[in-house]
Image (tube, grey):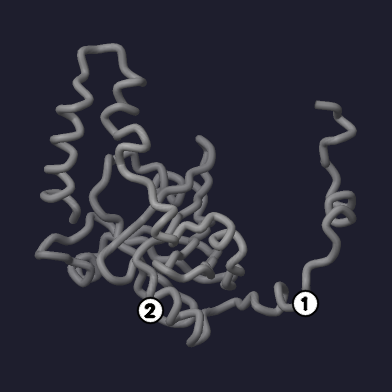
């Protein structure tokens, strides 16, 4: 690729795209108003973006009902549920507390974005308040809101992500066992892994 076709200057970038529409600027708030709060509380899923010394991370998060608890207009909390213990997100937060959240509501084409600063809490009362089926998370992430705004629907409309006729069958993509099997060289059994994974999903969600 020719260097002349690579954009490395902000001025050239802004010339290429033009100015942001006024509404795209004014919708950004430094807090959650009642409408933004309602959207966040309706979302059972979000993507969490962080950065640390080992690089970037963007991880999915899902929970029963609301993925996040809105404490007040400047504070959002979410439980760190059971996972693979890589701790990519949490390691990054310890090193660099900047965080980005992207909330999705099933069937809704708009998304909600929150950027802010995060801390990790293990306060017993707080952990207990996030218990599900008697199981508390090991930690809770608390985010102080610095920017909040909704994203227009174009991306999700283009992808047709909520259209039933656009849904793929599980057999249309590799299983977790098949993908893991392609990365190892021992006598790993993809089918056994997938069977065990289904059992773990039933027993270890919380």
Q: Nearer the viewer, residue 114 or 93?
A: 114
Marking on residue 71: 2
Q: Residues within 10 Å of mark 2 (few under 14, many from 20)?
A: few
Say above or below: 17 vs 20: above
Residue at 9% in and 64% down:
134
Marking on residue 38: none
Which circle, 2 or 1, is nearer the viewer? 1
What distance separates the C-alpha of mark 2 from that of mark 1?
30 Å
Residue at 90% in and 33% down:
4
Q: Which residue is mark 1?
A: 22
Residue 21, position as x, y percentages in the image: 78, 72
Residue 47, position as x, y percentages in the image: 45, 55
Say which quadrant the C terminus sits in.
Answer: bottom left
Total marks placed = 2
Say above or below: 129 vs 50: below
Q: Nearer the viewer, residue 158 or 195?
A: 158
Residue 175, position as x, y percentages in the image: 30, 34
Q: Nearer the viewer, residue 120 or 157?
A: 157
Residue at 51% in and 58% down:
160
Residue 194, position as x, y percentages in the image: 20, 34
Label 1 sits on a secondary structure element that is helix
Q: Residues within 10 Å of mark 1 (few under 14, many from 20)?
A: few
Q: Residue furthest front?
A: 165
Query: Which of marks 1 and 2 precedes in the sequence?
Result: 1
Image-based side of 14 in relation to 191, left or right:
right
Say which quadrant the N terminus sits in.
Answer: top right
Q: Nearer the viewer, residue 63 or 106?
A: 106
């Amino acid at each position: 690729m020719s260097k002349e076709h690579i954009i490395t200057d902000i001025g050239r970038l802004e010339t290429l795209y033009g100015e942001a529409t006024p509404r795209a600027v004014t919708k950004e708030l430094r807090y959650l108003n009642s409408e933004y709060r309602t959207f966040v509380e309706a979302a059972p899923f979000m993507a969490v973006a962080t950065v640390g010394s080992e690089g970037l991370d963007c991880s999915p998060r899902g929970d029963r009902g609301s993925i996040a608890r809105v404490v007040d207009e400047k504070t959002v909390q979410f439980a760190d549920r059971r996972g693979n213990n890589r701790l990519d997100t949490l390691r990054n937060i310890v090193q660099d507390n900047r965080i980005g959240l992207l909330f999705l509501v099933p069937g809704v084409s708009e998304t909600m974005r929150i950027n802010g600063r995060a801390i990790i809490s293990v306060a017993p009362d707080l952990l207990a308040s996030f218990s599900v089926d008697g199981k508390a998370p090991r930690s809770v992430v608390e985010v102080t809101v610095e920017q909040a705004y909704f994203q227009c629907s174009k991306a999700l409309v283009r992808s047709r992500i909520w259209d039933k006729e656009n849904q793929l069958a599980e057999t249309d993509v590799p299983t977790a066992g098949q993908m893991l099997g392609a990365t190892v060289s021992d006598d790993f059994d993809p089918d056994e892994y997938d069977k065990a994974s289904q059992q773990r999903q039933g027993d270890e969600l919380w």
